[in-house]
Image (cartoon, rainbow, N blue to C red):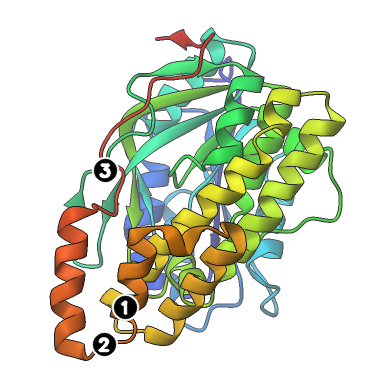
Amino acid sequence: MESKPLVSILVPNFNYGRYLDACLGSALDQTYENLQVVFVDNHSTDDSYDIAMEYRARYPERLRIYRNDQNIGGSQNHYKAYTQMDPRTRCSIYLSSDDLFHPTLVQRAMDLMNQHPSVGFVILHRSAIDEQGRVTEEVPFYNCNCVIPSTGQMEVFMMAGVGVSTQCFRNLRAELSGPVRGYRFDVAGDWYSNFCLACVSDMGYIRDPLCLYRTHATNVTTGAIKNLTNSVEHILLIHAFHRMAQGLGRPTVAARLAPALEKLGSMCLRYCTQMLQEDDLHTATRYLHLATVLRPDSPDDPAWNTLFRLTRCDAAERRQGLAEFLAARPQKRLVSYDPPAGSIIL
């Protein structure tokens, strides 16, 4: 066991006691042996800390537990989990306390990195799980397991985040010492971290769904869509990536600034549609306006005009029109992509 690098699974938590049994159980039941779990509770008011203490009684050598005296915010709690891991740690993985891992996740990620030393981080595909435990399969981002060269993945990250809930980092310090200072992302932090790592290393991708991502009304992503934080951070994110690419002399990455902003304008129509499904006309209208800021020709798009009309009609007409709109324009990605040129297919 000692010949294998130590891996730390970092579990920041706030008031997710109802999911913790499944989460911690999946983290501690990994087939990879040289493993430690670091749980940091952000001053929860539910039974989270008690549940974690029960697990420590069963796994005293494998589970570290810390509890903040006061809530320090989600971003700071994530960073604190990193600072509390064993200094011998060679690789680390964040696990949201409402998600859970497949038993082979750590082993699969470590096998890939051991076989490909240029890989600084591995992104693993996921499935969704709702509050009732029902699992929904999602389409993988790439259509194969692969190793993607640094610049090629940076170009992809300019245009899209890879929809994942976990990444295995060979050395998180590469992310923490990223080329741009002064940026902090509460919603898109993983996307930013991944881009920073792609600046200095290749990326591994595993298309098998080795993580279950919890979907529920109180998760961070859902709230960020309702208050537009996701799109505001996305704008800052694109500009941060552009600045980093320029500083690193990656012209093909920097050249994607304008297309990335235009694509975000199109994404605003998707968020508008989601808000209409929830009868939130105010937020739906805000997304329509933001779309025109990012893509000034948006009013020439038939989809924009349809959504604009739906924000102005009565409830019955809106429901009928929205059903027809969704039937003609699927809101989720339905295909997997080929990896960028120069990638290694595994």
Q: Which residue is mark 1?
A: 309
Which comes before the other along the chain, label 3 or label 1?
Answer: 3
Which quadrant holds residue 30?
Answer: top left
Q: Please state which amino acid type lies under the numbered disc 1.
A: Arg
333 or 66, nearer to the observer = 333
Q: Which residue is mark 3?
A: 138
Mark pair 2, 1: CA separation = 6 Å
| Distance in Å between CA atoms under marks 3 and 1 | 31 Å
> On screen, 51 above or below 64?
below
Q: Mark 2 or mark 3, which has the lower sequence index?
A: 3
Q: Are marks 2 and 1 in contact (CB under 8 Å)?
A: yes
Residue under label 2, please give it.
Answer: 313
Helix, strand or loop for disc 2:
loop
Q: Is residue 120 above or below residue 221?
A: above
Name which residue lies at 32% across and 56% down.
22
How packed mark 1 is, by other alpha carbons closer than 10 Å (few <14, some 14-19, many 20 or more), is few
Residue 274 visible: no
